[in-house]
Image (tube, rainbow, N blue to C red):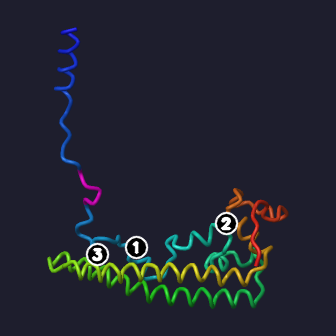
Amino acid sequence: MIRLTYLILAVVIALPVPAAAVSPYVGQTSRSIKSLSDEEVADYLSGNGMGLAKAAELNGYPGPAHVLELGDQLELSPTQKERTEAIFERMQTQAKSVGKRLIDEERKLDELFASKTISPPLLHQTLGSIASLRAEVREIHLQAHLDEAQILSQAQTMKYWHLRGYDGSAGHDHSHDGGAGHTHSH
C-alpha cells in the first residue's frame, strides 16, 4: 500500500503544471475595433446577411438574394424578378446604412475603453445604441424575407426549399417531389 501511495505521489509530482490559461482573444488586440473582426466589419458595411435571417430562412421564408440566384430554376416571372430586385436593393441600402452606424457605435465603445474615459452612463448609452442598431439590421433582413414570401407562389417556395437543400437533397433537382415535408402558405 505504501508503494502504491509513493507511486501515485511520484506520478502527480511528475505531471506538468499548467501554464496560465491562454486567452482565446490572443491576436485580436490589434483590431481597429476590438469586438469585431475585419470580416464582420466588412459584412456590416456591405449589407451582408450574416445569418441574421435564419429564423425566416429556415422556416420557409425565402431570401431575396437567394431567390435571385435561383431565379431561372424558380422560373420567376419578369414581375417577380423586378419585385425581388427591388426588395433586395432596399434591403441592401438600409442594411448598409444601419451597418455603418453600428460600426461607428462599436468604434466609439472601443475608443471609450481605450482612452479610459468610459463611465457607467456612457457604457449604458452606447450599449443601448449598439443593441438597437443590431436589432435594426436584423429586422431589415428578416423583413426582406417576409416581403419575398409575398412574391413567390407556394410551389416556388417549396422548390426554393428543395434547391437550398433544406429537404436533405441539396444539389439534386427532384422537383417532382413537390418539396415533400415542407408546408408553407401565402
Does the CB distance between marks 1 and 2 fall below 8 Å?
A: no
Q: Identify the image quadrant of residue 26.
A: bottom left
What is the magenta range?
22-26
| Image quarter of the C terminus | bottom right
Q: What residue type is labelled 2?
A: Arg
Residue 170 located left or right of residue 123 = right
Residue 167 located left or right of residue 121 = right
Residue 104's tag is none
Q: Which amino acid does label 1 sit on?
A: Glu
Q: How crowded is mark 2: few (under 14 residues within 10 Å), some or many (20 or more)?
A: many
Q: Which residue has dot 2 on it?
A: 164
Q: Which residue has dot 1 on it?
A: 40
* Residue found at x 24% / y 82%: 122
Depicted 23 relative to depicted 154: above or below: above
Estimate the x, y position of residue 156 in percent, counting from the top left: 77, 75
Where disc 1 sits, the SS reads: helix
* Residue found at x 63% / y 77%: 63
Residue 87 located left or right of residue 94 = right
Depicted 48 relative to depicted 175: above or below: below
Q: What residue type is labelled 3?
A: Ile
* Residue found at x 52% / y 70%: 51
Q: Identify the image quadrant of residue 67.
A: bottom right
Going from the N terminus, do you reach mark 1 or mark 3 first?
3
Where disc 3 sits, the SS reads: loop
Estimate the x, y position of residue 164 in percent, counting from the top left: 67, 66
Q: Which residue has dot 3 on it?
A: 33
Q: Distance between the residues labelled 3 and 2?
A: 34 Å
Which secondary structure dominates the residues rendered in magenta? loop
* Residue found at x 36% / y 80%: 130
Estimate the x, y position of residue 162 in percent, counting from the top left: 73, 65
Q: Does the magenta stretch include residue 183?
A: no
Q: Residues within 10 Å of mark 1 (few under 14, many from 20)?
A: some
